[in-house]
Amino acid sequence: MDMRPPISPQSPTYEVVGPLERVDERDTVFARASLISGTPQEREYHTKHPELGQIDQRMAKFYHRNTGPYFESVFGPVDALALPDVVDGPVSETKLLRPPDQFTSLTKRTARTLGADLVGVGLLNQAWVYSHKGRHPYFENYKEGRPVFAGVASDYTGLVWGDPLSIKHRFVIVMAFTQNRRLLRDGASGLVDFEIGRVYAKSALASVQLARFIRELGYPARAHHLRNYGIMVVPAAVDCGLGELGRCGFLITKKFGANTRIACVTTDLPLFPDEPANLGIQDFCSKCLKCAKACPAGAITKGDKVAVRGVSKWELSREKCFLYWGTKSHSCAICQTVCPWSKPDTFLHTAVATIAVKIPPSRRLLVWADELLFPPK
């Protein structure tokens, strides 16, 4: 039985311009905003990064602003899915043996049954694995500078802030889940919190369930979701053929545009990788500035790509984005909803998207038409 996966002849559409550098999760905006002044973690981080002290203090003031019935009802329960023995766990001693194509088909069917709208499989690029843990484990109270767990064993042995991360699985399964555009289009509001959180909760549960399913087949598997990421999910999704990285920083898919949330499972289950997609997004986004013009925070660049950790990409101002969320006390998804690719899944949109993919000269006209027919509010 040949258990070796084929090597995809197609390369992802992101341009590698230098050595790929792993990201330290402690440098992500949510990790920095969650630092509490005076704790050992905060002092250690800002000793190494004194230039971020002032902006991080501003963001920290807003870290707990996103609360309320809508927010707590959908984001709160996801915390229970973040514990180490939930995202990962023991592997069955009975190993099911099947060819990679059968396992791939089974895995995708299972993921869709669990609620995923798109599923892709790829080889896990170690450059997308975070180098260190940066988000605090949930069920904690860090106000006293030390973890205090509620309902969780005090002998917790999972990774904590600053611990090195190592995920040696060979494959990654990426699932994308669509959001209700009607609830997102009005900008920052409680309904936006509710819809984003609802989809994140759905994706988190599906990733945990899929990982558990694979472990029951006899193969290691770990879930990665909103409350416990070990990898960067967007580049992994690009590698798995779900879409391309857009100007807005989100994954852009042909069917749903930027209007998805992502969860993953890394595993050693033998699988066949999908080919990366080439939808022409890099060319399209270079002609389209709609998300940048619509962003109320000015967080999305209108300029050219720059080199970021070895990849050429449009760089976002993560701090501007976070501070806008904080001042509004709600999540925002304007860039996702105004994207010309984020239209309802209809015959017309499918036809226009196919034209954009197949006929590159049409893209400038399509950008103009979208601006005319669907002006940002």
Image (cartoon, rainbow, N blue to C red):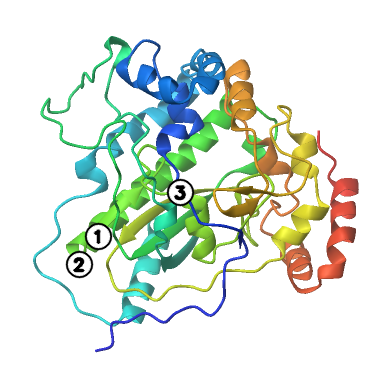
Could you say whether the residue bearing mark 2 is in a helix, strand or loop?
Answer: loop
What's under tag 3, amino acid-wise? Answer: Met
Side of 11 where 358 appears, left or right? right
> How far across and how far down the image is residue 86, in percent?
23, 44
> How far across and how far down the image is residue 293, in percent?
80, 37
- The image quadrant that residue 160 belongs to is top left
Q: Nearer the viewer, mark 3 or mark 2?
A: 3
Q: Residue at x 27, y 22 (%)?
A: 140
In the rendered image, the vertical position of residue 48 relative to residue 117, given as above or below: above
Of label 3 and label 2, which has the lower sequence position? Answer: 2
Could you say whether the residue bearing mark 1 is in a helix, strand or loop?
Answer: helix
Q: Residue at x 32, y 65 (%)?
A: 170
Side of 310 where 303 appears, left or right? right
Distance in Å between CA atoms under marks 2 and 1: 7 Å
Side of 303 where 69 appears, left or right? left
Q: Which residue is mark 2?
A: 217
Distance in Å between CA atoms under marks 3 and 1: 22 Å
What's under tag 2, amino acid-wise? Answer: Leu
- The image quadrant that residue 218 belongs to is bottom left
Badge number at residue 232: 3
Q: Are the residues at dot 2 and dot 1 in contact (C-beta closer than 8 Å)?
A: yes
Distance in Å between CA atoms under marks 3 and 2: 26 Å
Q: Looking at the image, which is closer to me, 70 or 26?
A: 26
Binning the other alpha carbons within 10 Å of mark 3 as few (below 14), some (14 to 19) or many (20 upward) gives some
Q: Nearer the viewer, mark 3 or mark 1?
A: 3
Q: Looking at the image, which is closer to me, 301 or 339?
A: 301
> How far across and how far down the image is residue 337, in percent?
69, 42
Q: Which residue is mark 1?
A: 213
> How far across and how far down the image is residue 300, in percent?
70, 38
Side of 235 where 95 appears, left or right? left
Badge number at residue 148: none
Using the rendered image of the protein, determine whether residue 117 is visible from the camera's viewpoint: no
